[in-house]
């Protein structure tokens, strides 16, 4: 029953938050600020993780492809498809759940316990719409760009390994990148990223918005936001893969 209660309250909050704002100019300014907070400030962690994971993945695949019957260009193909289909969407979003999700929950939770949200409500402002909608829109805009950047840098990480080591030649790696490329995989990855953006930003905002108590409860809300965001992301990853690839 508690789960049903939270699901109902979540959708009620989202219905309130996604109403059309009264002053678009104010919300546009908020949107730009949230894009910087959610998207631009996440560039560092996404870049570092993607490059190193691309390098490690290429090394691992090359080491395990020991049979002379396996063409070496399949190393590049494996790295490419792994990043496009799974890493740069699902795994990157699991990382962003920790960074972006906890930040959203703690920010809104702090506003709740310091009664800033109550002050907005008393002034006649739709606090849910003012605080949550720009974050959701910023995530929807930012996450697909982070996805494409992660794919590019992951492939670059594998390319660097091809240059610096002898596990695979640069020529074989590049041939593998081009071999049997399916453009729809990029579309699939971007669709997943949009869904995950909504999931992470909205669930984190929900836990922050209904924080009660003091600073300790803000920490708990952040933890719950990260945990539940990861669970729902993994669930929708399974559902979207079934719907879009089979």
Image (cartoon, rainbow, N blue to C red):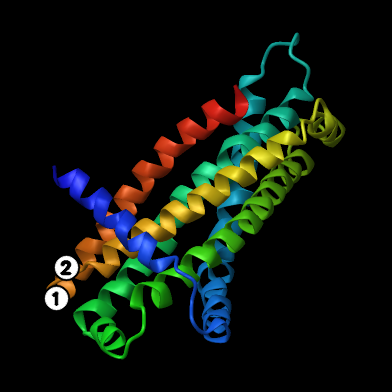
Whether residue 167 is visible, yes or no, is no
Q: Residue furthest top?
A: 69
Name the residue that disc number 2 marks.
217
Q: Is residue 9 above or below residue 158?
A: below
Out of 225 and 98, give the one closest to the viewer.
225
Q: Is residue 17 above or below residue 22?
A: above
Which residue is painted at 44% across and 48% down in the image?
A: 94
Which residue is painted at 27% across and 72% down in the image?
A: 109
Quadrant occupied by the N terminus: top left
Out of 22 and 234, give the one closest to the viewer.
22
Dot 2 alpha-carbon crowd within 10 angstroms: few under 14, some 14 to 19, many 20 or more = some
Apparent side of residue 192 relative to residue 235 in the rendered image (left or right): right
- Pointer 1 with pointer 2, Cβ within 8 A: yes
Q: Secondary structure at mark 2?
A: helix
Name the residue that disc number 1 marks.
214
Apparent side of residue 152 relative to residue 97 in the rendered image (left or right): right
The image quadrant that residue 81 belongs to is top right
The image quadrant that residue 122 belongs to is bottom left
Out of 93 and 240, give the one closest to the viewer.
240
């Amino acid at each position: 029953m508690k789960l049903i209660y939270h699901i109902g309250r979540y959708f009620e909050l989202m219905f309130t938050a996604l109403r059309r704002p009264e002053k678009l100019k104010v919300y546009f300014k908020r949107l730009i600020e949230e894009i910087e907070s959610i998207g631009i400030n996440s560039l560092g962690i996404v870049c570092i993780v993607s490059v190193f994971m691309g390098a490690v993945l290429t090394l691992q695949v090359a080491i395990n492809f020991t049979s002379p019957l396996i063409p070496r260009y399949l190393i590049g193909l494996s790295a490419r498809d792994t990043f496009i289909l799974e890493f740069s969407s699902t795994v990157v979003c699991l990382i962003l759940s920790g960074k972006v999700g906890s930040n959203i929950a703690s920010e809104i939770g702090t506003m709740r316990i310091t009664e800033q949200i109550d002050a907005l409500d008393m002034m006649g402002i739709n606090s849910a719409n003012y605080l949550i909608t720009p974050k959701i829109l910023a995530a929807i805009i930012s996450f697909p760009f982070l996805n494409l950047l992660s794919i590019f840098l992951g492939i670059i990480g594998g390319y660097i390994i091809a240059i610096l080591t002898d596990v695979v030649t640069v020529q074989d790696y590049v041939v593998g990148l081009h071999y049997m490329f399916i453009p729809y995989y990029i579309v699939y990855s971007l669709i997943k990223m949009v869904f995950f953006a909504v999931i992470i930003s909205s669930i984190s905002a929900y836990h922050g918005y209904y924080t009660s108590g003091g600073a300790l409860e803000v920490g708990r809300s952040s933890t719950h936001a990260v945990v539940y965001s990861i669970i729902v992301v993994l669930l929708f990853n399974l559902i979207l893969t079934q719907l879009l690839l089979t």
